[in-house]
Image (cartoon, rainbow, N blue to C red):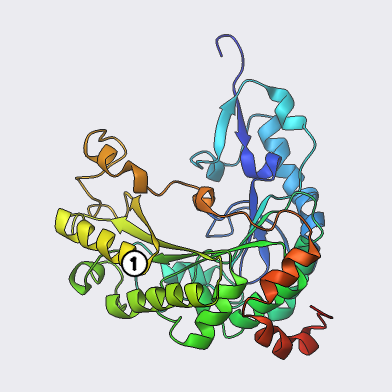
Amino acid sequence: MNNVEAYRYCGPLFDGFYIAVQSDGLVVCSCRDAWDVISLGKVPDSSLYDIWHGGKAEAVREMFRQNTPPDTCRNCPFVVATSDKSKLYSKIKTPYMVFIETNSTCNLRCKRCDRTRILANREKPHMDIETYKTLVDELNTLENFKFLILHNYGEPFLHKAIYDMLLYTRAKAPFINTYVSTNGLLLDTKEKQQIVANTVDQIVFSIDGSSEVSYIQYREGGNFEKAFNNMASLADIKRQAASDIDIIWRYLLFKWNDSDEDMQRAIYLSEKTGVTLCWHITSYPPGAQSAKYTWDDKLNTQRIEDRLWREPPYGVLNVKRNNYDPKKWQSIASLGVSGYFARYKERFGCGKL
């Protein structure tokens, strides 16, 4: 880039990499904007399409074109340098991924989480189900849309209507790829697990340890045995119902859970239950990070590379709903979820399946 001016380029805002909708309906350009620093609009006051192409979003893009992006964007990992200014004037694409924060509350007190501040920045801690349904209906029409991510800064299964939301999504928009991240503590009945197994494409369980001793040091208020058993039970239901849900065990590596003993036990448990284990290297909270496994350490970290969690995580997602094929969907629905659809079909006006 010698003698050529370098511009900052935002993947989400220009490429439509993704957009996030918070529990109160505020739309922000990134799931990393927890504090509504750059609010682009609000649903259902406006459609997601209109917000994405509207004045507030365009004003932020213009700041990038003038090479004066907002201060909050300067340290964002999705903002990169480019010498090709024409990229800043390309046609704006509709979002490829959409985060929907159905709930911003949590049942845990994790050490890196500022829950008080998060809730102070939400008008509503739980998204109205009508707002959610409106969003899903619109997402089903967007040209480039592929992935629905049902989490952001809260535990999704704390929402009292989350199972209705999952059923509505699969019934009304069966070819949306749906992804959920959870601490796993609330998926504690067979009925809940049955719905998830047949409506979600990928679920990530955040369980940071292979025993209560290591797990509880970060997941304050949690219970390792309960979270793990719920994950294992979902894996059993997956096999019984011939579901093709991807079940991922995400294990944040800290200085207290990165011993060979802890990690070998996690590998054993994951293989025994049939879930995919991923090691997640993190630098938060300060002072708690693993000294043994870091991105800068090419020796130790290379030993676990085949299980490393990469951002974004959707590379491991089994994309199974790319083509609109009603016959394919009918065969999926018949695998075990048809009883649940019969229960909800009339309420949601889903028509015949």
Which residue does the image show at 77% across and 88% down from the upper left?
Answer: 347
Left or right position of 207 against 237: left
Q: Secondary structure at mark 1?
A: loop
Instruction: Determine whether 339 is above or below 144 in the image.
Output: below
Name the amino acid, label 1: Ile
Left or right, 271 with reference to 129: left
**Residue in the image at 62% along x and 38% along y:** 10
**Foreground residue, 5 or 327?**
327
In front here: 147 or 35?
Answer: 147
Q: How many numbered badges does the structure rendering display?
A: 1
Q: Is residue 40 visible?
A: yes
Relative to 219, residue 48 above or below: above
Residue 282 on image: x %, y %: 33, 50
Quarter holding the C terminus?
A: bottom right
Position of residue 198 relative to residue 313, above or below, is below
Q: Quadrant of residue 19?
A: bottom right
Q: Quick one: label 1, few (<14), some, or many (20+) residues within 10 Å?
A: many
**What is the x, y in percent for residue 314?**
54, 51
Which residue in the protein does label 1 denote? 207
Considering only vertical position in the picture, is 189 above or below 331?
below
| Residue 132 seen by the camera | no
Residue at 71% of width from left, 28% of height from top?
Answer: 87
Provide residue 316's location: percent of width, then percent of height: 50, 51
Q: Quadrant of the N terminus?
A: top right
Q: Nearer the viewer, residue 41 or 234?
A: 234
Q: Residue at x 40, y 63 (%)?
A: 275
